[in-house]
Image (cartoon, helix red, strand yellow):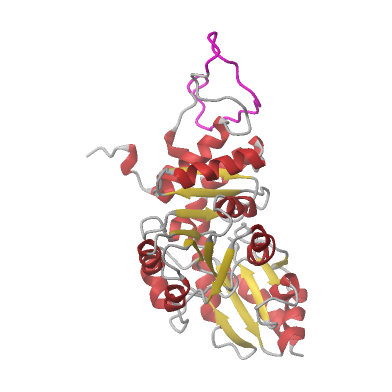
């Protein structure tokens, strides 16, 4: 039996960039199109479908089509950053609309919702990401227009029940958007679970090499809300550069391999330190003792992701010392790259952060897990001398 391209495994679609061959040179690598404008037809029409580089560029379309295929959606858009993508989802709403979002989530978006978007006219209710009942109580039929989820939620990795919350939201006339940056389309398919919109900070796993700032949105259907999001991107100018779009699609071609390796190593690291005498707690959905483990096992496939957090015995000072003494774990803000990163998260988020002061956020790269464990062991030992 010969499989059609639509039947190919997602890993194959990603590795081959959907199998496209450039028609003129027959290149197996998607080309980069730097053009900012396009010639009209003789009768002043644009039959090629492209008018100007801000809303239209073939380089964007390559990555967008690939992401749409991986997410099982109807269409995707690239943005200049993860914040630009997330912002577009909220700016496409109207002043007076009500939004429900998790209390523990990406801090930059949480602060923006609490500040600028509240002043703009949105009403936002923040709830426990893992408490479906809290979402049910916060959603107001006819008034709530968007329920925003981030699962696993950064940096405690709580798991939200996408299917259950989507059912609640849809019954109330609201849409559900999922920040799936940590899970990636490899581990979770939010649209298949009932989500209307999926967001990624493309800077992280989609690119995977810490050399592109990007964001993405994928919609389950093309409707009036999606058209407003398209207008926000074009009118605000929140577009990605063509070279960055090309780098993003190049990174996506190895997404499966990187996510699978990071997930395997993260599980090993989490299991190693789960009962460590110098560690107070390990937060990782792959651990059976983690509060959201069973839901994560049902909702995620192929692994539990490359992100975990450890709470260090000895409090904030000990945690900061551990981060200072690692050699392989680099002290840097971000996640999803090939290199492993460590960060004292509360220091980044500031005094209003809900993150415990003894928490270190770990982004596991593709290095050998034994080396990463050994490096953490020696840093813990130094911090507890």
Residue 81 percent across, percent down from the top left: 64, 50
Left or right of 40 in this view: 212: right
Q: Is residue 245 above or below residue 381?
A: above
Residue 15 seen in the figure: no
**In the picture, which quadrant includes the C terminus?**
bottom right
**In the picture, which quadrant includes the N terminus?**
top left
Residue at the farthest top position: 42
Q: Quadrant of residue 191?
A: bottom left
Residue 124 seen in the figure: yes
Left or right of 138 in this view: 281: right
Q: Is residue 1 above or below residue 312?
A: above
Residue at the farthest left position: 1
Task: Tell me if residue 35 is in the magenta stretch.
Answer: yes
* Residue found 74% across the figure and 89% down from its top: 384
Q: Quadrant of residue 334?
A: bottom right
Residues 334 and 376: in front is 334
Residue 335 percent across, percent down from the top left: 63, 61
Task: Tell me if residue 114 is in the magenta stretch.
Answer: no
Q: Main secondary structure of the magenta part?
A: loop
Left or right of 96 in this view: 139: left
Residue 235 percent across, percent down from the top left: 63, 39
Stretch of the chain drawn in magenta: 23-45
* Residue found 35% across the figure and 65% down from its top: 167
Residue 348 percent across, percent down from the top left: 74, 70
Q: Is residue 357 above or below residue 242?
A: below
Residues 266 and 40: in front is 40
């Amino acid at each position: 039996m010969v499989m059609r391209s639509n039947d190919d495994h997602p890993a194959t679609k990603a590795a081959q960039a959907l199998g496209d061959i450039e028609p003129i040179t027959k290149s197996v690598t998607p080309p980069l199109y730097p053009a900012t404008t396009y010639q009209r037809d003789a009768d002043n029409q644009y039959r090629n479908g492209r008018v100007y580089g801000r809303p239209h560029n073939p380089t964007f379309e390559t990555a967008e089509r690939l992401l749409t295929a991986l997410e099982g959606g109807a269409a995707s858009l690239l943005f200049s950053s993860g914040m630009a993508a997330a912002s577009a989802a909220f700016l496409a709403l109207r002043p007076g609309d009500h939004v429900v979002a998790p209390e523990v989530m990406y801090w930059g978006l949480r602060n923006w919702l609490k500040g600028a978007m509240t002043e703009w006219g949105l009403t936002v209710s923040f709830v426990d990401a893992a408490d479906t009942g809290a979402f049910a109580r916060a959603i107001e039929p006819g008034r709530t227009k968007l329920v925003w989820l981030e699962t696993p939620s950064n940096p405690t990795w709580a798991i939200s029940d996408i299917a259950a919350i989507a059912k609640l939201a849809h019954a109330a006339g609201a849409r559900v958007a999922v920040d799936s940056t940590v899970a990636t389309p490899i581990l979770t398919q939010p649209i298949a679970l009932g989500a209307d919109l999926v967001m990624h900070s493309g800077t992280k796993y989609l690119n995977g090499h810490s050399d592109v700032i990007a964001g993405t949105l994928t919609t389950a259907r093309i409707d009036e809300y999606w058209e407003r999001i398209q207008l926000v991107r074009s009118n605000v100018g929140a577009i990605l550069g063509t070279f960055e779009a090309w780098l993003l699609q190049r990174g996506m071609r190895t997404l499966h391999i990187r996510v699978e390796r990071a997930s395997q190593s993260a599980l090993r690291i989490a299991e190693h330190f789960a009962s460590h005498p110098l560690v107070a707690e390990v937060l990782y959905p792959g651990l059976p003792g983690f509060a959201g483990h069973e839901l994560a096992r049902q909702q995620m496939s192929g692994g539990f992701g490359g992100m975990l957090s450890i709470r260090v015995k000895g409090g904030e000072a000990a945690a900061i010392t551990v981060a200072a003494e690692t050699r392989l774990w680099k002290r840097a803000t971000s996640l999803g790259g090939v290199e492993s990163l460590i960060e004292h998260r509360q220091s980044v988020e500031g005094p209003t952060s809900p993150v415990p002061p003894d928490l270190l956020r770990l982004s596991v790269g593709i290095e050998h897990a034994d080396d990463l464990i050994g490096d953490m062991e020696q840093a813990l030992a130094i911090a507890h001398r």
